[in-house]
Image: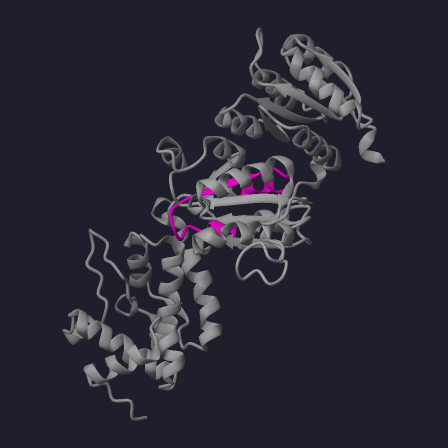
């Protein structure tokens, strides 16, 4: 097979690492050369042609990063370089990716992880790296361009990615963008909200179960890992899983085998894992709420998404993007934002980030009765500390919370032609609550 004729150079000062890698890869049919000296390894890499170079970071005389810089930034060799880092050296590994490393392995790594990293490197080429825009991520700030570049860089590897950021920053959008640009784009993409999983059924949901495994298990069922086989699994809010489930998840990541609940036999799976959280995982590791070994396994490539208030130049492009979507969806009269409305959007602090902006734009498309959105048409759930934002028409003089809610309900009712069910769904309340508010506010529902 084509992937078994590759020529590999191992540069590592630890003889045990070199020997272990050589034995594992030789059995796969690869041609192996090895060296324990970084300077000599650099000479060999420049003199001969290799498909892959396994390069340790911590070495005497010259560091692996210095070797990497000379190979990729000064001579631009064609070999894919896989960095080998020590336990917990995630920051160094991320820096290596910026210098042109294809992937990296964190010690201690398993034979399965090594074989998989090498196979991925051999099957990829620099020409296959995805280019062009990422339509799901709107904005043209320098931060957004940097984020898109990071996504393109990691998409065509099979590395596990840890996506962090506040609620509403678009972590699932980033995960989806990675999957769409990856070699698994035509395979299943299975998103899982870990915060919504019931504790006593969490392992069954993730790993599946066999018939009779527990009370109520009337038939065998696949878990999310089995559903995502050969594709991508996205675990959102991973900090919510229990320590017991964390232990099983760690084993699944290491072995790529999923033991179903109630079964002694494991299902072999091939899954690319993306995870996300709005919590500070390092703090949870320190407090004993999250396993340290699992933390290092899932944070192979960390991507931190900035809150919207830290890249304000993207606010208007994002708002316009959702305005175009919801104008069509709700057949709205709205055509554009006024200058004052744009200024208001820019000054607001957006504690709910992109999700809040999206909901705000949808709300005004439903409720605004003018072609041009004015500042008074924008209903916020909070106010910027430096600016009083009118939530209703300032000329009406009605600024109490009761009046705000009453007018909000009246506008929604008119838009949905006084259909209680549709209006209640839009407002996020049940029909009974809406009828009670209509009665209490004395809202006339006579068409």
Question: Which one is nearer the viewer's eye here, 141 or 325?
Answer: 325
Region of the chain picked out in magenta, as a range: 148-173
Question: Which one is nearer the viewer's eye here, 410 or 396?
Answer: 410
Q: Residue furthest bottom?
A: 446
> In the rendered structure, does residue 151 fall within the stretch colored magenta?
yes
Q: Residue 347 location in percent, x, y?
A: 28, 53
Would residue 371 be seen by someone viewing this image from the given angle? no
Question: Which one is nearer the viewer's eye here, 445 or 393?
Answer: 445
Reply above or below: 308 against 219: above
Residue 9 in the figure: left or right of residue 368: right
Q: Residue furthest top?
A: 61
Would residue 440 be seen by someone viewing this image from the given angle? yes
Quadrant placement of the C terminus: bottom left
Question: Which one is nearer the viewer's eye here, 221 or 12?
Answer: 221
* Residue at the image position 39 percent from the left and 81 percent from the top: 421
Q: Residue 212 location in percent, x, y?
A: 60, 57
Quadrant placement of the N terminus: top right
Residue 189 in the figure: left or right of residue 315: right
Residue 245 in the figure: left or right of residue 401: right
Reply above or below: 108 against 290: above
> In the rendered structure, does residue 107 fall within the stretch colored magenta?
no
Name the image colouring. one colour
Q: Residue furthest right?
A: 1
Q: Quadrant of residue 364?
A: bottom left
């Amino acid at each position: 097979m084509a992937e078994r004729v590759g020529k590999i150079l191992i540069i590592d000062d630890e003889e045990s690492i070199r020997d272990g890698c050589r034995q594992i890869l030789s059995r796969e049919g690869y041609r192996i050369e090895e060296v324990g000296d970084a300077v000599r390894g650099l000479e060999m890499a420049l003199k001969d042609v290799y498909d892959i170079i396994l390069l340790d970071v911590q070495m005497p005389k010259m560091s692996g990063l210095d070797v990497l810089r000379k190979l990729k930034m000064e001579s631009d060799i064609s070999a894919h370089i896989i960095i080998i880092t020590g336990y917990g050296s995630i920051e160094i590994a991320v820096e290596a990716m910026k210098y042109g490393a294809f992937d990296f392995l964190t010690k201690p790594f398993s034979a399965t992880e090594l074989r998989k990293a090498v196979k991925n490197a051999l099957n990829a080429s620099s020409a296959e790296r995805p280019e062009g825009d990422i339509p799901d991520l709107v904005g043209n700030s320098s931060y957004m361009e940097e984020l898109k570049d990071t996504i393109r860089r990691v998409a065509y590897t099979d590395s596990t990615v840890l996506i962090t950021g506040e609620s509403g920053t678009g972590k699932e959008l980033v995960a989806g963008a990675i999957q769409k640009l990856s070699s698994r784009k035509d395979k299943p993409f299975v998103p899982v909200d870990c915060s919504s999983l019931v504790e006593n059924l969490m392992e069954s949901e993730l790993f599946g179960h066999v018939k009779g495994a527990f009370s109520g298990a009337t038939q065998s069922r696949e878990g999310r890992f089995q559903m995502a086989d050969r594709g991508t699994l996205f675990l959102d809010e991973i900090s919510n899983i229990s320590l017991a489930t964390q232990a099983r998840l760690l084993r699944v990541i290491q072995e790529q085998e999923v033991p179903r609940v109630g079964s002694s036999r494991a299902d072999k799976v091939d899954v690319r894992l993306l995870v996300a959280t709005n919590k500070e995982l390092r703090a949870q590791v320190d407090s004993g709420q999250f396993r340290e070994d699992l933390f290092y396994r899932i944070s192979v490539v960390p991507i931190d998404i900035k809150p919207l208030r830290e890249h304000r130049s993207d606010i208007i492009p994002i708002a316009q993007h959702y305005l175009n979507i919801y104008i069509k969806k709700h057949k709205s009269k709205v055509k554009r934002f006024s200058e004052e409305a744009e200024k208001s959007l820019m000054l607001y602090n957006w504690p709910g980030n992109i999700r809040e902006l999206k909901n705000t734009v949808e709300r005004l498309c439903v409720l605004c009765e003018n072609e041009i959105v004015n500042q008074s048409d924008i209903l916020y759930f909070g106010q910027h500390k430096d600016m009083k934002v009118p939530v209703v028409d300032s000329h009406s003089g009605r600024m109490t919370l009761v009046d705000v809610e009453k007018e909000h309900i009246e506008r929604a009712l008119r838009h949905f032609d006084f259909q209680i069910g549709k209006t209640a769904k839009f407002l996020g309340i049940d029909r009974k609550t809406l009828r009670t508010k209509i009665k209490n506010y004395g809202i006339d529902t006579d068409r």
